Amino acid sequence: MPDQPLSHSAVQVTQQGVAHRGKQEAETASAGRAVAPADPESRLFEALCNTFEAIRAELRLEAETLELEIMTRLRETRLLQPVGMRSSRLGMRVRKPRRPGGSFTLEWYRVRWRGRTDYIARGAGDRYGRKAFIGALAWERAIALDAEQRLSAIRRQLRLMSEIERRLKALQGLRAQEAPETIDAQALTGPHGEDSA
């Protein structure tokens, strides 16, 4: 599955609605693949990482689609409000990974004035709570809380994949440290357990 290109991940929809080719797929294709690691554990780890990359690409596409839906819904609802209630201050964005190999984030923000925004802190967990939207208008808060059901599911999947990768890397490190001791012990005892000295 990870070696086959995903049919719907080749085109991604951005907030502006512009379709473009997936940059990660192009970079992977142009860089070429390194020689596969010799041991089965490394191959398994690499296959799992490739699978997670494919899942992240699917989740990013879903998140960008949700971003468009949410922002469109906020705009359309704002236009239906009376003049005094039209000053929309809430927005949602899909932020690029902050480091190479990292995961994208789904964030809510408040608009202070044209071109200036303040990030709304999520706190612990995968979901923004009701308190995060205290400064928002009632209709904005309702849209945000409704959208958080789907956004929190994406955040949870991203968090779980990151935890699995982190723990597997730690396991690989431990197994790599134990490997030289095992080889040294086999050299002293011989191939069948008899003492070679």
Image (cartoon, helix red, strand yellow):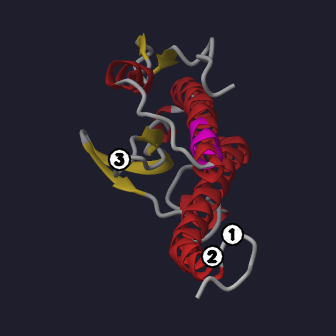
Q: Position of residue 119 (x, y in %)?
A: 39, 56
Q: Is residue 62 left or right of residue 85?
A: right
Which residue is at 57% across, 76% downward?
187
Tell me which corner region of the image, top left, top right, bottom left or bottom right, holds residue 188.
bottom right
Q: Quadrant of the C terminus?
A: bottom right
Q: Position of residue 3 (x, y in %)?
A: 60, 23
Q: Is residue 88 visible?
A: no
N-terminal of the two: label 3 or label 1?
A: 3
Tell me which corner region of the image, top left, top right, bottom left or bottom right, holds residue 73.
top right
Which residue bears the numbered disc 3?
A: 100
N-terminal of the two: label 2 or label 1?
A: 2
Q: Secondary structure at mark 1?
A: loop
Marks 2 and 1 in Cβ contact (< 8 Å): yes
Query: Residue placed farthest to the front in the image?
Result: 197
Which residue bears the numbered disc 2?
A: 186
Amino acid type shown at disc 1: Pro
Q: Residues within 10 Å of mark 1 (few under 14, many from 20)?
A: few
* Magenta: main secondary structure: helix
Which residue is at 54% across, 78% downward?
184
Tell me which corner region of the image, top left, top right, bottom left or bottom right, holds residue 151.
top right
Which residue bears the numbered disc 1?
A: 191
Q: Separation of disc 3 and disc 1 at Cα?
A: 44 Å
Amino acid type shown at disc 3: Pro
Question: Which residues fall within the magenta stretch?
Answer: 44-50
Q: Is residue 88 left or right of residue 133?
A: left
32, 178: nearer the viewer: 178
Q: Nearer the viewer, mark 3 or mark 1?
A: 1
57, 63: nearer the viewer: 57
